[in-house]
């Protein structure tokens, strides 16, 4: 039996006026995802929806198409749907990951460092680092399949995935030799073509909401409420790797001060070259 890790990545709050941008997703073994999809379809059938839009759900409205008028959820049905959503995640206990940054902090440091104009790619770089270089099947790893929602340029997304795969294969003495041949397959499409991208939408949106509320910690805590009923229920039950970058932490990473000189961190955009001053 061949087992690969299926990882789904989506963005949240990506419009240009957004104060905080987040990219996140979740990963599980490929043969686990059909069980999630079965539970998810039960949720969609209950909601009478063809696909899940978590932004709408958290606003307590729903619509079958984006052009349709919104319909408000009945309170009791909304609570049932929220429980069903959590039960779908609990069915497969995926590993979740999300990275967020304030646009004002990012734009200020972009004037000093050579990083992408769009913070989506900086955050996607962190997600790719997590799944390509940081998630492996034990005791035998046979590769990872990464699915990205069609939020941004397909060529740039796949090029970033290839960068991380090449970095892994060219690693130094601290890598296991078999990782040099690890299979990394990246696909790009909609959350209709790849239904678990709707799970990634939930993860990215929930962490975006957490990061937008002046969080007490840059990661999702397990020892006190997050302000999200969904996060409070799910975070203690399976792994979450998260980081909400503020200006101080972002500058420390870009400058390279956080990393030993003889062991690069494996990020495509950090440490970043400082722009030449006029």
Image (cartoon, rainbow, N blue to C red):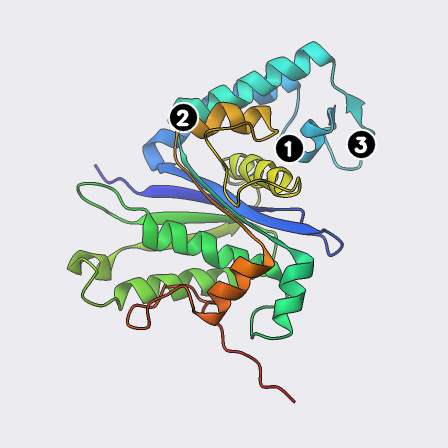
Spot the residue most to the right: 69
Q: Residue at x 39, y 51 (%)?
A: 130
Which residue is nearer to you in this view: 226 or 11?
Answer: 226
**Measured along the vertical axis of the image, is residue 209 above or below residue 37?**
below
Left or right of 262: which side holds 247? right
Residue 30 appears in the figure: yes
Tell me residue 98's x, y (percent).
50, 45
Q: Earlier in the sequence, mark 1 or mark 2?
A: 1
Q: Earlier in the sequence, mark 1 or mark 3?
A: 1
Dots 3 and 2: beta carbons under 8 Å? no
Residue topped by disc 2: 237
Q: Residue at x 28, y 46 (%)?
A: 136
**Measured along the vertical axis of the image, is residue 233 above or below residue 217?**
above
In the image, which disc is placed on residue 54? 1
Q: Secondary structure at mark 1?
A: helix
Left or right of 226: which side holds 186? left
In the image, which disc is placed on residue 68? 3
Counting other residues with Cα less than 10 Å from the Cα at mark 1, is it few (<14), some (14-19), or many (20 or more)?
Answer: many
CA–CA distance in space, label 1 to label 3: 16 Å
The quadrant in which residue 65 appears is top right
Q: Residue at x 33, y 66 (%)?
A: 167
Which residue is nearer to you in this view: 241 or 42?
Answer: 241
Tell me residue 41's x, y (percent).
53, 22
Counting other residues with Cα less than 10 Å from the Cα at mark 3, is it few (<14), some (14-19), or many (20 or more)?
Answer: few
Q: Secondary structure at mark 2?
A: helix
The quadrant in which residue 248 appears is bottom right
Tell me residue 13's x, y (percent).
67, 47
Tell me residue 36's x, y (percent).
44, 26
- Nearer the camera: disc 1 or disc 2: 2
In the image, which disc is placed on residue 1? none
Q: Secondary structure at mark 3?
A: loop
């Amino acid at each position: 039996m061949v087992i690969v890790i299926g990882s789904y990545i989506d963005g949240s709050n990506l419009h240009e006026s957004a104060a905080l941008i987040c990219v996140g997703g979740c990963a599980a073994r490929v043969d686990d995802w059909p069980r999630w999809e079965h539970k998810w379809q039960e949720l969609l059938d209950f909601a009478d929806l063809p696909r899940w839009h978590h932004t709408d759900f958290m606003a307590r409205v729903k619509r079958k198409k984006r052009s349709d008028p919104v319909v408000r959820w009945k309170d009791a049905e909304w609570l049932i749907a929220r429980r069903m959503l959590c039960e779908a995640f609990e069915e497969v206990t995926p590993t979740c990951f999300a990275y967020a940054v304030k646009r004002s902090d990012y734009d200020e440091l972009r004037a000093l460092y050579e990083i992408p104009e769009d913070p989506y790619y900086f955050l996607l770089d962190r997600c790719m680092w997590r799944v390509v270089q940081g998630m492996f099947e034990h005791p035998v790893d046979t590769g990872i399949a990464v699915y990205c929602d069609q939020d941004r340029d397909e060529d740039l997304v796949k090029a970033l995935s290839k960068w991380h795969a090449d970095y892994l294969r060219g690693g130094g003495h601290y890598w296991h030799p078999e990782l040099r041949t690890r299979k990394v397959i990246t696909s790009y499409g909609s959350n209709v073509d790849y239904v678990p991208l709707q799970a990634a939408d939930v993860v990215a949106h929930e962490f975006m909401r957490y990061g937008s509320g002046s969080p007490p910690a840059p990661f999702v805590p397990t020892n006190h409420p997050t302000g999200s009923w969904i996060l409070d229920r799910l975070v203690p039950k399976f792994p979450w790797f998260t980081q909400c970058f503020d200006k101080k932490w972002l500058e420390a990473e870009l400058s390279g001060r956080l990393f030993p000189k003889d062991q690069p961190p494996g990020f495509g955009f950090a440490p970043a070259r400082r722009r030449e001053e006029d």
